[in-house]
Structure formats: C-alpha cells, structure tokens
Image (cartoon, coloured by chain):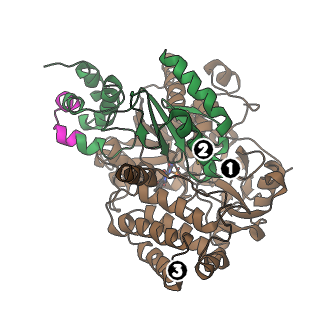
Amino acid sequence: MTTAIYSRVQKLRKQYPEPTSAVLPALRLAQEEHGGWLPPEALREVADALDVTPAFCLSIASFYDQLRLEPVGRHLVEVCTNVSCALAGAQQVVEAFERGLGISAGTTSADGGFTLGTVECLGGCGWATVVAIDNRHRLRVQAEDVAGIIEELHAREA
Amino acid sequence: MPARPEVVFAGTNGGALDRVEDYEAAGGFRALAKARAMAPDDVIAELEVSGLRGRGGAFFPTGRKWAFVPKPEQLAKPHYLVVNADESEPGTFKDREIILRVPFRFLEGCLIAAYAIQSQHVFVYIRGEYEREFEVLRDALEAMRKRDLLGEITVVLHRGAGAYICGEETALLESLEGRRGQPRTKPPFPAIAGLYAAPTAVNNVESITTVTSVLELGAAEYATLGVENSTGTRVFSLSGDVVTPGNYELPHGITLRELIYDVGGGVPGGRDLKAIIPGGSSTAILTASEIDTPLDFDSLVKAGSSIGSAGVVVIDDRCCMVQLGIRVSQFYEHESCGKCTPCRVGTRWLTQILQKIEDGRSSQADLDLLLSVCDRILGKCLCPLGDSDAIAVASYVDRFRDEFQAHIETGRCPLGGDSSLEGILAPSAQHERHLHEVVHA
Ligand SMILES: Cc1cc2nc3c(=O)[nH]c(=O)nc-3n(C[C@H](O)[C@H](O)[C@H](O)COP(=O)(O)O)c2cc1C
Ligand code: FES
C-alpha cells in the first residue's frame, strides 16, 4: 500500500547510510500532512514507509517537543518564557495572548482556531520577546503588539 | 570602545554575505582552494597552530579533535563530519546569525573540515525551530552544488524537532541515527566510534565557520587575536537587561564591562547591575563586582565560572535570584532526557525546593538540602545537563546567599512581588496549571 508520503519518505531514506535516520524528517513530513499533529494513522504511514513499527515511531515522536500527539489549532502561537525573554516582559506577552484569544496557555480554542503555549528558549534571546507563530519567529514582541498580531491571524483565517 | 576585528563576520559590513557571487567577490572559497592544495594533516596542523578551540561550550581544541579521528587507512570505514547547529543553550543565539549572514563561509568551513578528516559525508544537525536558517542553508548549498564546489562530498541538512539535549554531541548522534536523543556512554568518543559507529568529528557552527577564516588569514595571524589559551574572536550573544542586546564579534579577553557598557550601552533606565550569566544558562553566575572579569577561558575559570557558549545575560536589580533559580531549573527539568536518575529526579527536586523557598515555606534545612541535591547530581550522569542545573543553582546560592537567607528568615520574597521574573510561566508549569484549572472549573 502506498500513502501520500510513501514516495517522499523513500527519497528521504536515500540521504542516509541507514534508513532509520529518516524517521525524524519523515515524522516532520507526516505532521505537516496531517494538520500539524501526528494521529495514529500518521505514525502508521511513517512506520510502513520505513519498515519499522508504529510503536517505534511513537517512541520517537513522544521525545521531541515539536512533534505533537494531540490535535493543534490552525494557528500555533508559542511564547518563549526563558530567562532573557522573561526579563523583557514575556509574561505580559503571554497574558495579552490569553486575554486576546480567550484561552489559557497550554490549551486550544474551542473552534480549533488557535493553540497557545509557552516554550523554552527559541535562540533569539537578544531580540526578546520571541514568539513563534506557525513556527515563524516574531522578534521583540511586546504586550502592546499582541492585539495586532491576533487581528492579522484572524484576517488570514477569513 | 574596544577594537572590533571581524573574522567570522568579515566583509559583511553589518549585513549579510548571502549571495554566492558576493561571497566569491569578497574572496570566498579561496580558503577551500588553499586547504585542498595542502595535505589533510597539514590542514590539521594549521588548526593546531591557530589555537582555535570549540565554540559549542566545551572549548576543546579543534585541531586536536580532528587529529584523534583515525586515518582511513587505519580504520576502513566511512568517516563523518557532523556539524552541531542545534543551538539551544538559553542566552545563546549566535549560530543562527552566522548561518543567516555568512552561510557560505560556514559551508566552506564544512568542506575544509571534511577534507582535513578525509570525510566524504557531512551532516548538519540544525535545530528544528530554525526555519529561515534551514532555508538559507538549503539555498546556499544548492548554489554551491551548481558551481561544482562540493566535489565528491555530500552535505545533508538534518532538522531536529525540539530537544535541548540533542545539542550534546552523543545525544545528537543518537538522534541523527533515528533514535530518542539520549547521550551515550563515553568512551568510545565520537572520533573513534561516532555516527553509525564510524569515526566522526562533531563541531559547532561557529567553530567550523572560523576554520575558513583561519585558513584564509593563516594560523599565525589568527593567533595574534585574543589572548593566550583563548585565541581569536568570539561571537558574544548579549541579552537581558541591557540597552542594545545582540550578537557582537569581539576578541577573547575583552572584559564584561567593555561588552556590557561600551558595546551594549549599559543597563537601561539607569538601574543597577546585579548579576551576569557569562556563558549561557549552564554557567555559574557572577556578581556586579566581577564586572572587570575578562571574557576568556582562563579568566572565567579563575572567577569560578566558564565561558561556555559565550551567551552573556545581564540581570539588573529587579530580579529575584530564587526566582531565577526556579526558572533556570525548570528548563533543565523539562529538557532532561530521563536516562540518568540524578538528573531526571534531581532537576525536578531543585525546582521544588526553590519554589518552597520563594513561597516562604522553607527552613534552613531546605537550603542545605538544595545544596546537597546539587552535590548529588554533579558528575554522576552520562552527560553534563544535570550538572548545568546544579552548577547554576549552587552559584546563585553562593553569590547571593543573603537573599536566599532573607527568603527563609522573613518567610517572603524581599522583592515583594516586584521581581522582573514574577509569575513567569514555564512550559513545565503550564501543563500543571492547566490541569489545576480543569479540576477547579
Ligand atoms: C546539554 C548539552 C547541550 C549542548 N548543546 C550544544 C549546542 O546546542 N550547540 C553546540 O555546538 N554544542 C552544544 N553542546 C556541546 C557539544 O556536546 C559539543 O561539545 C560541541 O558540539 C563540540 O563542538 P566544538 O568543539 O566545535 O565546540 C552541548 C552540550 C551539552 C552537554
Ligand atoms: S530566552 Fe527567549 S529566545 Fe532565548
């Protein structure tokens, strides 16, 4: 049986002397294809394409923060709250998003529009606060900027 | 203003040298040609003369590391160069800027390094959160392929997926082989049995980029920069309570005062400097009175800390040191891979004891317990992730004991709710808070 990602994973396999090395890129790919998370069928597709078991894929997926085993909103908002961002006011940014989106950090809105979370250092400490929006980094975000960002995301939805 | 020789960022004029034509016009790829005209061992010898030491955190001499990799005739297996672009040490954001501004100098360094250790296979393990950096490297590689600069060498960009531990070199190799990123027992060291159990050099992005500059300038010339035992320049990541945070390339040996005040514009709002983390959150903290410490390997060891990844975090007088300990400890607790018990359990324990102190529920025995847990983590695990937490937390107690004591004796935080870290929500606490909300809803 060939799935949507099967042939692309075969190409990934060839980059490596040993095919198991392709499991991380393959899971990333599967996650993209499945709306930002890895439902059981995504793990099965990767397992089939790499001749490993779904349980093995799960053991990998559960280790890495960017691989998700629960559904996420159509937009993913992640605020860095490590030290440098925290010193620059990351908590106020988190709270502005909580108010603006009407959800608390760590949750997804009821309509599935947004997932809000806090994350560890994103490697942009000198441009604090760093906020990853759908995996793209916004730099120097302040609480005042949040309403505008949310508006922009709503506009993208429409 | 201290002198600012540019080596890593040479020729960029504050911008990016990210088009292959521009890089070539600025003298790009000459170092590669020079290296390929030398015997591989002579390239290694050149690196040894330069005094270049690893920029990833451990400061191991780059030339010596390569010399440990057996020759192909000694060990008939493929050899690998693995570049560590997993940059995740809190306070560190330099490799990312290097990739964006001098991608070709970095990739040229990869080819030189591969030549020196006689490898045909380069893997760049780039942190999963770096989207644009990945795209820039992908496009730069394509441009080099078109110009036939890669020759026989394959370069694979391998994206991580969010795990600080994968920056530790053996965890990185596990991850690259398709497993959970958990550190390996050493020895054997990667030079002998690394990727797929074959000889492997693992080097940081800045180290590799500097290799290009060393070949270009000549090792002796490069070694005139910086100070004894810490030659050359360093890309310092400056962040926290400072007027102009950012990455600054400066020679090793400049002082914290020069970096923070002359280059970084000092502490905003005329507030007082309280503390400095000199080399990423894994390094011991320094107090304001240590502001004249030079930023080089030996000086920081003498000060009881480490140059680490050169991520300098400036902290002003609004910050509670117990809260800082909590936040730093939450990070290591979250990132512990769980393989070694002292780290898995100890990091969590440190967070909990610190929280108790911050909440004013602690007694003197808790402070003793905190330091004893630090002792029981230190040196007892396969990798230094847990050590980093222990070193950081123990240094906060050591340097700011009065503040810890005040929490215990008065039963409250001396900053009384006004600390700059008040209420900060760590990912590890976010889930617990959510559960709490659900239960009480
Ligand atoms: C927990 C942990 C995280 C690390 N993270 C990184 C990292 O993100 N980038 C890096 O280059 N080195 C990191 N290191 C250091 C590497 O293990 C290794 O020493 C380095 O990549 C070697 O390259 P260098 O000699 O060029 O510095 C980390 C080490 C530990 C223990
Ligand atoms: S602390 Fe937020 S990006 Fe590093």
The label shown at residue B239 is 1
In-front residue for pair B227/B297: B297
Which residue is most to the front? Answer: B441
Which amino acid, mark 1? Ser
Q: Which chain is brown?
A: B
Q: Is mark 2 within 8 Å of ligand 2?
A: yes
Which amino acid, mark 2? Phe
Q: Which residues are magenta?
A: A46-57
Give the answer, above or below, for where A121 lies relative to B411. Answer: above
In-front residue for pair A141/B386: A141
Is residue B74 visible in the rendered image? The answer is: yes
Q: Chain of mark 2?
A: B
Secondary element under disc 3, as helix, strand or loop, is helix
Give the CA distance from mark 1 to mark 2.
9 Å
Which residue in the protein does label 3 denote? B367
Give the answer, above or below, for where B281 lies relative to A121. Answer: below
Marker count (numbered): 3
Task: Characterize the magenta stretch by its predominant secondary structure.
Answer: helix
Q: Earlier in the sequence, mark 3 or mark 2?
A: 2
Residue at 52 percent of width and 80 percent of height = B367
Q: Which chain is green?
A: A
Q: Is mark 1 within 8 Å of ligand 2?
A: yes
Secondary element under disc 1, as helix, strand or loop, is strand
Whether pointer 1 and pointer 2 mark residues with C-beta atoms closer than 8 Å, the reply is yes
